[in-house]
Amino acid sequence: MAMLEVENIHSYYGNIHALKGVSLTVDEGEIVTLIGANGAGKSTTLRTITGILKPRDGRVQLDGEDLSHYKPHEIVYKGIAMVPEGRHVFARLTVSENLDMGAYSRNSKQEIADDLERMFTLFPRLKERRSQVAGTLSGGEQQMLSTARALMAHPRILLMDEPSMGLAPVLVEAIFDTIKQINKEGTTILLVEQNALMALSVANRGYVLQTGEIVLNDTVDKLKKDPTVQKAYLGME
Amino acid sequence: MFRNWMQRITLTDVVIWAIGLAILIGVIWGSIVTLGTGKYSTATWIDLTLIGLALGGVYALIALGYTLVYGILRMINFAHSEVFMSGPFTATFAAWALVGAGWWNKYPILSLLIVLGVSAVVSSIIAVLLERIAYRPLRTAPRLVPLITAIGASFFLQYVFRGLYGSGLKGYPEMTILQGFWMLGSIRVFKTQAVAIVGAVIMMLILYGIVQWTKLGKAMRSVSENKEVAALMGIDVDKTISRTFAIGGAAAGMAGILYLLLFPVAHFFMGFFPGLKAFTAAVLGGIGNVPGAFLGAMMLGLLESVGPSLFLDGLGIPAPYQLKDAIAFSVLVLILIFRPTGILGERLAQAKA
Ligand SMILES: Nc1ncnc2c1ncn2[C@@H]1O[C@H](COP(=O)(O)OP(=O)(O)O)[C@@H](O)[C@H]1O
Ligand SMILES: [Mg+2]
């Protein structure tokens, strides 16, 4: 059984039919990527998984449990955390306070302290700036903070929405290295990206989303060789 | 550069600055005249300052409710003056019950704590119900809608409490241990004022500590920045908003008892002026900002108590003390014109960017 199972979801914004029957699965330990052009519905898919958006049809299951009846904050307790598109750190809170909020769903002080250490090892920059207000961090640092904050929930699965957006190429490399590292340490990842090349280089499997529908679904090796993917997402002729 | 600057000035700017300058000159001139005549003794000035600080403390505790709710919902809870009224009005009856039981002067500290507790709990419950019933269903409505609802709720609560407790004035019993004054060196401090000042400062510090250092406080600040992202942290946004109202309500309820120490009369309309002044204080300090609310409230309390004698008297205005309420509202209008972000507001805006 897959860890995360999205079954035929239809999500709407008012009358806009943003997701037209999206299905995907993520197995424990995998990195799965969801790629697609701007406006394809990638963020909408993640928002539906986290319960912020309720699908009109279809369902999301985690370890076989239907999540439809849970509110967004309850879904965090089930083990899903998200790094939202555009990072959205709490600008007026300090780095430390942001990380505290990431661990909001947890109680064990010891485990939280251990994970905090782990985050500071993963992102030494955050340690240097821990008492600084998050709004004063650079874009790359905010991305680190947003990622660390989500990891502080100690999720079973981490959803990442375009972590490379707006970052300089060196930072993009660094972010993808971290993604591999986090996954190696045991966190399952569903990665949404427009940067298909990078996404396909770190993931195990991928889905291609086009105007609210999954049009392709395969291992990354096969996707990289697919002519439509090469043309539309990898910029090859 | 200078030319550019010149071109950007409009007639409105000129008029506004002229008004500002006229007021400033008036205040300075009036103060000089008053001080020159030596009409008031140093002792009087000290008395007025102490009254100002006590009032400021009360306003600060009420202002906290406006500022917290604004921070989290971006709405002005105009019914907060009634949240403020509900607690002390109810507590006045509790106070008389304690008098009847013979506890009031026998166990004054315990009695005071009971009355504070009753007031805080009632105001807190009213605030939470207000949010749950009147505001929550409107959370996604355009901003004007909850604002109008708040004004409606304000009238509703006034009439509910008038219905419950009557439209008359209800005296608040005096405590023998709080009669008279203490001497602080050569300064005479009325005991009620001292209790109000010290009590307000302690409560403000506790409330500031809650907002700044507790898990709840951090959750409140997260929700005030971004509700959706706060939910992604596992924060129950509705519950956090409820608790924000509860804290703001409790602070207002406790402020109500301090207010009764200064003006020992409760009635269904008692929230109006303190409420509006606390709102002014919150705007003056920079709404949404807790230290700002404190600062704004202290400034307003002082302006209101010292101002009439200091500059209105000097300008030859008859019965200046009756204009103390007008000072608060002039201040509100002036900040809205000159510095809508309030004193500490800019720091907030910068931090946000
Ligand atoms: N808040 C919203 N209100 C209305 N339409 C929206 C909203 N958010 C997204 N959409 C629409 O839903 C579709 C999918 O958007 P989104 O999931 O953000 O795409 P992606 O993340 O793939 O760029 C787009 O057509 C977009 O215009
Ligand atoms: Mg998106």
Image: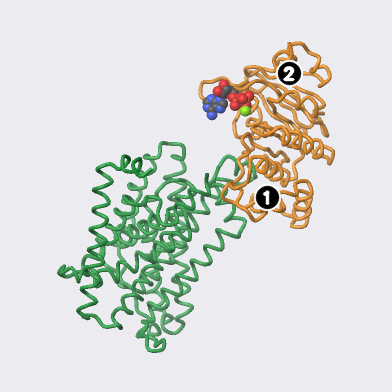
Residue A145 pos. (x, y %): 68, 45
Residue placed most toward the observer, B3 or B104: B3
Residue A105 pos. (x, y %): 68, 48
Q: Amino acid at mark 2?
A: Leu
Q: Which residue is mark 1?
A: A99
Residue found 42% across the figure and 46% down from its top: B75
Give the class, few, some or many, for how many residues have Cα within 10 Å of label 2's Cα (few <14, many ≥20). some
Mark 1 touches mark 2? (CB < 8 Å): no
Ligand 2 has an atom within 8 Å of the beta carbon of the residue at disc 1: no
Residue found 71% across the figure and 32% down from its top: A169
CA–CA distance in space, label 1 to label 2: 35 Å
Q: Is A154 left or right of B324, judged from the image as shown?
A: right
Q: Which chain is orange?
A: A
Q: Which chain is green?
A: B
Residue placed most toward the observer, B56 or B12: B12
Ligand 1 has an atom within 8 Å of the beta carbon of the residue at disc 2: no
- Image quarter (top left, top right, bottom left or bottom right) of the C terminus of chain A: top right
Which tag, 1 or 2, sits closer to the chain's start?
1
Residue A46 pos. (x, y %): 66, 30
**Residue A234 shows which numbered tag?**
2
- Image quarter (top left, top right, bottom left or bottom right) of the N terminus of chain A: top right
**Residue B246 shows which numbered tag?**
none
- State whether residue B248 is above or below residue B1: below
- Subunit of label 2: A
Label count reads 2
What secondary structure is marked by label 2? loop
Residue found 74% across the figure and 31% down from its top: A190
Q: Quadrant of ligand 2?
A: top right
Residue A13 visible in the shown view: no
Quarter assignment of residue A156: top right
Residue B101 pos. (x, y %): 41, 79
